[in-house]
Amino acid sequence: MATVVLGFAAAGVLVPFVSGASVRAEGARMTLATKLAGELIEQIISTPFDEIVSKYDGHVEAQGQVKDAAGVVFTDLAYAGFSRNAACQAVYVPEESQAAQAIFIRVTVGISYRGRPIVTLDRLVSE
């Protein structure tokens, strides 16, 4: 009888630790995802303005194939479940003719973990 009571008491004490570990792991994934999104945006904005849309619109790095700035796939297991994509669109202000070359590009980078979107960053880029 004492063993059963002790077992229930121990289970009640361990539950907060298990959920705390889960929250910590999710926070670590969010931090890494934000870092990956920021790195890709920095890579995109360092590209010449007139090449951004042609080079990065529709850019996809599949799960486990995320690359660093040098184009090398991350081999650390912490990156294994991540994938990322980018979309780049010309943005026109109301006074601007859409026939002219756009002076702004909206860059959107999305990061997913095991197929579930977790971070999206947007940035407006100009010449």
Image (cartoon, rainbow, N blue to C red):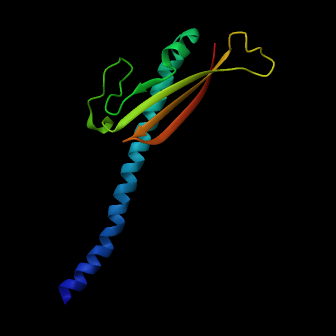
Q: Is residue 58 left or right of residue 21?
A: right
Q: Is residue 118 left or right of residue 78?
A: right
**Residue under the point 42% across and 38% down:** 112
Expressed as whole percent of the image width and height from the top left, the position of residue 42 reads 50, 22
Question: Which residue appears farthest toward the bottom when viewing the image?
Answer: 1
Asked which quadrant contains residue 116, the reply is top left
The quadrant in which the C terminus is found is: top right
Expressed as whole percent of the image width and height from the top left, the position of residue 73 reads 30, 24
Question: Which residue appears farthest toward the right when viewing the image?
Answer: 95
The quadrant in which the N terminus is found is: bottom left
Asked which quadrant contains residue 79, the reply is top left
Q: Is residue 93 left or right of residue 58?
A: right
Q: Is residue 87 left or right of residue 21?
A: right
Expressed as whole percent of the image width and height from the top left, the position of residue 6 reads 23, 82
In depth, the one of 115 and 68 nearer the eye is 115
**Residue under the point 36% across and 50% down:** 25
Expressed as whole percent of the image width and height from the top left, the position of residue 4 reads 21, 84
**Residue under the point 36% across and 56% down:** 22
Count of picture labels: 0
In depth, the one of 107 and 89 nearer the eye is 89
Asked which quadrant contains residue 105, the reply is top right
Q: Is residue 111 above or below residue 21?
A: above
Q: Is residue 81 above or below residue 74?
A: below
